[in-house]
């Protein structure tokens, strides 16, 4: 096979990418996309899908291999050249200027100019036209920082279209969306394809892959496992291709054995330094032996809630009690001593010190106590032994505790955090986005551990942007919107994603009495 | 089917061996790179000197062998190294907590000044004569470090600015006290009386009756100090907290460490150690105070800490190395008529190349490239 297949709009052949540190991110990968298809690219974190797409978009140079666009061999040195070839990419982190209008953002870098000045009218007109043509409704004159995430994403897509993209790479586009917004995005994607565009859809949510894509390419360990027609495979089959073995993400929980109230949160308020009220009187309980799941679009106060409870931020008003003991605005140390463990949402900045060893990471909450410190001196033997035990117990893939945490994969890093927090024998475990960026194998393990903690009578507060995760793990679900509790569901079994979605969007709001009753 | 099998099949023994092999390779590479870097800088200096029409061979002979060709120069070398090691250790403590305390200069001066008040005017028995001024100096260094430390930790004041300003204040204060209070009436030079005989740190020349300049027992203290600081950082809970903050301050706070307190104390303890360099100059080297007493040592100490990558056990090596360059540089000036500016440029290039680790990164990248092709 030395000529490009005539049908493909993009073909990547025998792509090899080796990073200077010797890591093989792409190991002779073949990938081809047909015109006007929705092509899902799936794989666990670190499987190499981002690298492959960065190569296609000119952000990385392949070590070896060829790229053909519309049958012609090309070399792509920069995103600029990729765009010239009709390839556009929408990143996970939006690259928009918040204080600019949508139209200004769309034309940024390729502005229509009249007499040396930005032709604002032309920009608005161009944006309106594109938005109508592809069914991506936006108000061109709205300021980006004032519109919700779903709209910002559309702006990113419009930006790519404005530059003439025929092939759109969407990098985990649903990660930040509500179920309703996801539906709208999917409708827009189908529209794009009807209008002659081609979409590459990077994801690890297999349900969405099933729902939207025509074909799916699966990567594992830097290699392309296979490309198949989506309707010919099941979710389980895709999962098996990704992981290389059977996986079970369906959580089995024994019946709820709900105990005493462990965490009591009452009328909690938080105001940011900028004066924005991000928690507006939040009240709820978490009981021993239950998992209370907090659902909500990110940025609706969940982060603040978790950090106020764990002592990392100071509440403006309200009370937090742990087993009756007031821990409102206590220091992180006091909160921990009271029996709270915390899996933070951002493990890279909060949960771990990447430049420190696994062993050191595992004792940050207990280093000054026996057996780790005796007679004023650290006990290296005890510290190493603690690491050995926890590495075994939590199946952390590391040769020993002296390895730096920064050299672990996301999943194993999360296991280090999990190992530390669970081994502190907490009464309350606060788990924020515990499986974000974690591969399926490790997610499975983390789910097991959370459920096991619950079964052992720990009160678990689970905060997750992944509604699916909340629904499969939680015994009760609380929904947050704009710093308020909009719903508490005492039963999860009969709930639909749509129903929760209405409360996430703030369309529905349970009455105060109901919330108080279900607290 | 045992679904967990692939996870458990991870071969820990093999992985351990691989990691340790890699670590050893990496260490050897590091060492090789450091030596190659020094060589590269020397070659560059060689070319520059030749281009300027001076005799590079003569200059290099002076630079490389100058410090060891006479016992007196060996003494000068070791005496200088003692200062650099002590300041370097103090600096390294704060740096390990990722606090860029530049207060070494001021802490030395303040330590020497206050130590001198005791050492000159308070007659004490042997041993105590040295110990008391040293402890007093450490206390002053501690307070002088604590101030910017508290300002940084609790008020978020930039430590670079505050330590630099504090240095300026301390230096002026030193000049003032020396000129108006310590200088004996009628003396024509601005200097203090000598310290009490019991306050003198014995020099090797006095101890062994050889002509080795002013290198003294302070060298032993500095070497023991390196071990002590290593123990402090690697083997005490306080050291753990410093390292955790240095690795990731938010992580340390999340984990329950009182980060403010530890940061403030890291500045303070570093100050106490740096002040010992001032005491060494006072009791071991000059045995009295005069204007511009510490020269550039506070600054060079920062370089020494950086060279050692803030590893206390490497500080003596980097201190000896840097002192060697300084003494060798003096020899170059005198023997090869190469200007001191040029000597400093060559020294700076060596330091820059090592600290920036340019060559190391380049070699690593090349190695990866070659491996790719295989």
Image (cartoon, rainbow, N blue to C red):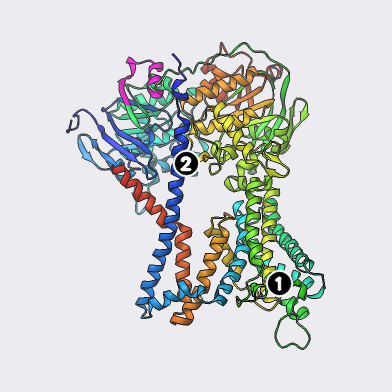
Compared to residue B194, the image places residue A246 above or below, namely above
Q: Chain of mark 1?
A: B
- Quarter of the image with the N terminus of chain A is top left
What's the residue at 53%, 73% (across, down)? B327
Residue B3 sits in quarter: top left
- Do the dots labelled 2 and 1 sit on one chain? yes
Whether residue B244 appears in magenta in the rendering, the answer is: no
Could you tell me how many numbered marks the image carries? 2
From which residue to which does the magenta span run?
A: A225-243
The relative height of residue A80 versus residue B118 in the rendered view (above or below) is: above
Q: Main secondary structure of the magenta part?
A: helix
Q: Position of residue B71 (x, y in %)?
A: 56, 75
**Taking the image as drawn, is residue A519 in sight?**
yes
Label 1 CA crowd tier, 10 Å (few <14, some 14–19, many 20+): many
Q: Secondary structure at mark 1?
A: helix
Quarter of the image for residue B182 reads bottom right
Q: Which residue is mark 1?
A: B283
Instruction: Judge left or right: residue B23 versus residue A195.
Output: right
Q: In this rendered view, identify the residue nearer to me: B234 or B223.
A: B223
B242 or B208: nearer the viewer: B208
Q: Residue at x 72, y 45 (%)?
A: A376
Residue B90 visible in the picture: no
Instruction: Quickly name the residue at label 2.
Output: B20
Specify the subunit that label 2 lies on.
Answer: B
Q: Nearest the camera: A378 or B261?
A: A378
Dot 2 alpha-carbon crowd within 10 angstroms: few under 14, some 14 to 19, many 20 or more:
some
């Amino acid at each position: 096979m030395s000529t490009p297949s005539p049908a493909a709009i993009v073909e990547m052949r025998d792509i090899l990418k080796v990073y200077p540190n010797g890591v093989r991110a792409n190991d002779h990968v073949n990938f081809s996309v047909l015109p006007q298809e929705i092509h899902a690219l799936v794989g666990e974190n670190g499987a190499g899908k981002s690298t492959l797409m960065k190569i296609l978009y000119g952000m990385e140079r392949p070590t070896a291999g060829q790229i053909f666009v519309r049958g012609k061999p090309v070399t792509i040195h920069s995103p600029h050249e990729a765009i010239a070839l009709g390839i556009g990419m929408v990143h996970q982190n939006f690259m928009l200027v918040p204080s600019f209008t949508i139209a200004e953002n769309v034309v940024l870098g390729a502005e229509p100019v009249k007499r040396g000045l930005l032709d604002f009218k032309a920009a608005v007109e161009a944006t309106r036209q594109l938005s109508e043509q592809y069914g991506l409704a936006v108000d061109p004159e709205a300021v980006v920082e004032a519109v919700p995430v779903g709209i910002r994403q559309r702006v990113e897509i419009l930006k790519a279209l404005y530059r003439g993209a025929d092939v759109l790479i969407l990098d985990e586009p649903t990660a930040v969306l509500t179920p309703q917004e996801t539906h709208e995005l999917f409708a827009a994607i189908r529209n794009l394809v009807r209008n002659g565009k081609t979409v590459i859809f990077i994801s690890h949510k297999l349900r969405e892959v099933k729902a939207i894509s025509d074909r799916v390419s699966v990567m594992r360990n830097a290699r392309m496992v296979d490309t198949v027609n989506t309707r010919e495979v099941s979710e389980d089959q895709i999962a098996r291709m990704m992981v290389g073995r059977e996986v079970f993400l369906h959580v089995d929980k024994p019946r709820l054995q709900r105990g005493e109230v462990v965490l009591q949160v009452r009328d909690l308020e938080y105001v940011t330094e900028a004066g924005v009220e991000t928690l507006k009187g939040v009240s709820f309980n978490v009981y021993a032996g239950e998992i209370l799941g907090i659902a909500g679009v990110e940025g609706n106060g969940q982060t603040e809630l978790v950090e106020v409870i764990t002592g990392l931020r100071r509440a403006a008003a309200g009370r937090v009690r742990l087993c009756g003991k007031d821990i409102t605005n206590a220091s992180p140390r006091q909160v921990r001593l009271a029996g709270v463990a915390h899996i933070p949402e951002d493990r890279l900045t909060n949960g771990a010190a990447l430049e420190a060893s696994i062993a050191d990471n595992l004792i940050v909450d207990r280093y000054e106590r026996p057996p780790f410190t005796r007679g004023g001196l650290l006990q290296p033997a005890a510290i190493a032994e603690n690491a050995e035990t926890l590495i075994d117990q939590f199946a952390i893939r590391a040769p020993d505790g002296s390895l730096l945490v920064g050299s672990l994969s996301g999943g194993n890093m999360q296991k280090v955090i999990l190992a530390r927090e669970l081994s502190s024998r907490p009464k309350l475990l606060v788990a924020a986005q515990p499986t974000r960026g974690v591969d399926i194998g490790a997610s499975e393990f983390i789910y097991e551990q959370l459920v096991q903690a619950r079964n052992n009578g720990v009160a678990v507060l689970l905060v997750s942007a992944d509604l699916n995760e909340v629904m499969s793990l939680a015994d009760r679900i609380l929904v947050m919107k704009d710093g308020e509790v909009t719903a508490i569901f005492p039963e999860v079994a009969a709930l639909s994603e749509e129903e929760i979605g209405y409360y996430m969007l703030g369309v529905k709001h349970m009455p105060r009495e109901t919330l108080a009753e279900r607290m | 089917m045992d679904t967990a099998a692939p996870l458990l099949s991870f071969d820990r023994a093999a992985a351990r061996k691989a990691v340790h092999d890699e670590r050893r390779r990496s260490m050897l590479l590091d060492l090789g790179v450091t030596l190659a870097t020094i060589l590269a800088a020397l070659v560059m200096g060689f070319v520059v000197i030749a281009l300027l029409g001076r005799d590079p061979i003569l200059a290099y002979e002076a630079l490389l062998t100058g410090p060891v060709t006479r016992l007196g120069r060996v003494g000068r070398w070791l005496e200088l190294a003692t200062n650099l090691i002590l300041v370097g250790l103090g600096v390294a403590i704060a740096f390990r907590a990722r606090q860029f305390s530049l207060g070494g200069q001021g802490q030395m001066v303040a330590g020497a000044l206050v130590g001198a008040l005791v050492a000159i005017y308070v007659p004490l028995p042997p041993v105590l004569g040295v110990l008391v001024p040293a402890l007093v100096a450490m206390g002053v260094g501690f307070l002088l470090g604590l101030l910017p430390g508290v300002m940084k930790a609790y008020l978020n004041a930039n430590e670079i600015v505050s330590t630099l300003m504090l240095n300026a204040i301390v230096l002026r204060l030193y000049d003032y006290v020396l000129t108006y209070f310590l200088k004996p009436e009628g003396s024509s030079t601005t200097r203090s009386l000598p310290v009490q005989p019991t306050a003198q740190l014995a020099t090797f020349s006095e101890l062994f009756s050889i002509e080795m300049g002013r290198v003294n027992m302070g060298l032993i203290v500095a070497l023991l100090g390196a071990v002590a600081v290593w123990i402090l950082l690697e083997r005490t809970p306080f050291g753990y907290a410093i390292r955790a903050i240095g690795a990731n301050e938010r992580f340390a706070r999340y984990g329950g460490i009182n980060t403010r307190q530890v940061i403030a104390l890291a500045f303070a303890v570093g100050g106490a150690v740096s002040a010992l360099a001032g005491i060494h100059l006072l009791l071991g080297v000059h045995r009295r105070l005069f204007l511009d007493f510490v020269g550039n040592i506070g600054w060079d100490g920062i370089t020494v800490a950086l060279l050692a990558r803030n590893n206390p056990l490497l500080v003596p090596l980097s201190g000896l190395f840097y002192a060697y360059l300084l003494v060798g540089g003096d020899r170059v000036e005198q023997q090869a008529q190469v200007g001191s500016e040029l000597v400093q440029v060559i020294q700076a290039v060596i330091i820059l190349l090592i600290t920036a680790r340019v060559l190391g990164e380049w070699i690593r990248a090349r190695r990866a490239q070659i491996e790719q092709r295989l």
